[in-house]
Amino acid sequence: MAVRSESWRQIGTRVDVLVSDSELQHAVEAVHSTIASADHAYSRFRDDSELSIVNRSPGRRVAISPTLTSAINTALVAANATNGLVDPSVGRAVRLIGYDRDFRSLPADDTRPLPMRFESVPGWQAIHLDTHALTVRVANGVELDLDSTGKALIVDEAARAAAAVLPATAGVLVSIGGDIKVLGRPPRGGWRIQLSENCDAPSRRGNPTVSIRDGALATSSTTVRRWRRNGHIVHHLIDPRTGQSCGGPWRTATVVAADCVTANAAATAAILLGTAAPGWLSARSLPARLVANDGTITYVNGWPMDIQEPTPRAA
Amino acid sequence: MRNDAVERPDPLRKRISQRDQAIARVSRITTATAVAGAMATVGFGGLAAVTYSGDLTNTDTTPITSDGQSTDGAEVTSQATPVPTLSTTRSGTPTVRPPTTTRTRSHVSSGGS
């Protein structure tokens, strides 16, 4: 069964669309269009996005589109399900550590001073979404950041949009920044995914690789989107409890789930949970692979051990 | 608003009011269905049926105009508080098949981004 693929960059990250046993073009167009629509609704880096308008209107109810309503709704569900570990109200904290523009535009060594005082984020309860009237109001001091669950939601919706234009016998994989959703009939042996610290890593034989036939897979990592801020290493993964880049024992977490939003939120929550992550994931029947800061790997809930490649013999 | 119909119980006005309310209800149901459809993909294995206590009477919104700017809305005095609740317990989480390992060259990579 032939697999066709196309890759490009959009919303500041890599997009991959793979189709088994079908033409590719219609699926690519469906994915591209889904991403563009979401970008207009909830990009944090576009002044004209609906999200930016909401963030500029604290304390007021703002009429929003169904697309943004769905994205905020999703973020609130994830926040509730993770007990606030994945929280869309981190926008101000993310901005204060310096992540206030597209990451590729950030200076590698930002010499601006860090805020004098960090504090926990306001919390998702400060976001008042009315899914019937399609309005949202955020409290004063709250800025929304939907990067995490928003991207995963795009993956789920883009995969569904692509599958809708493919014949029933085909299958599709959509990956946006390494967050992956598959639908339809997989290729022989399933969809093969290399596990990396960085989703832009080239495919190399011998790297840990897994296969999935359905569902979704997502990875969160503190090893990317890192930069130096006034002498301190910071990264994009904010702990809502402190308002700072999180620490903890894990540097990378990969989770499989039925949908990408769940996989993404669980992977992020796992890093923030620290040593409690394996138990938390097991309780939710989510298979996961956790990479500790020293490189040791913990496998959770049936995730298979990496294949150890034999060491080449010395001549 | 429809306060006139309350103050002067004209049967015709009452019927018009009832018709308008019915149309509004259908509109809300349609919107809610669209949002619920999007939510069907979400939620820790599909267990996130979300309940919101939407205040449908509050209309003091700040609309986004065609030029992408918000208009100056009135200060909100009442609000719709979202109360997302999980409708099932953890045991309701659908089983997800763990991945399998393979030595075959990968199609894509997953990692931080």
Image (tube, rainbow, N blue to C red):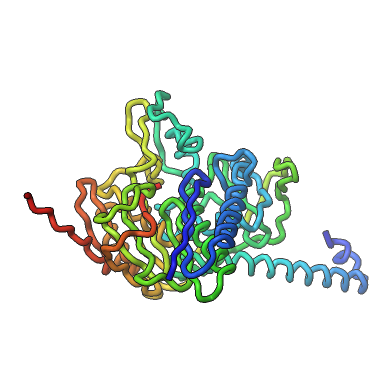
Res. A161 image quadrant:
bottom right
List the single residue furthest toward the front: A315
The N terminus of chain A: image quadrant? bottom left
Q: Is residue A60 above or below residue B102?
A: above
The answer to whether any part of residue A202 appears in the image is yes
Res. B13 image quadrant:
bottom right
Q: Nearer the viewer, residue B5 or B107?
A: B107
Q: Residue A210's x, y, as percent?
A: 31, 63
Q: Is residue A245 above or below residue A265?
A: above
Q: Residue A194's x, y, as percent?
A: 32, 57
Q: Nearer the viewer, residue A235 or B55?
A: A235
Q: Nearer the viewer, residue A175 or B9?
A: A175
For the point 72% across and 44% down, which residue is it?
B74
For the point 32% across and 69% down, which residue is it?
B98
For the point 55% across and 58% down, which residue is it?
A28
List the single residue furthest toward the left: A315
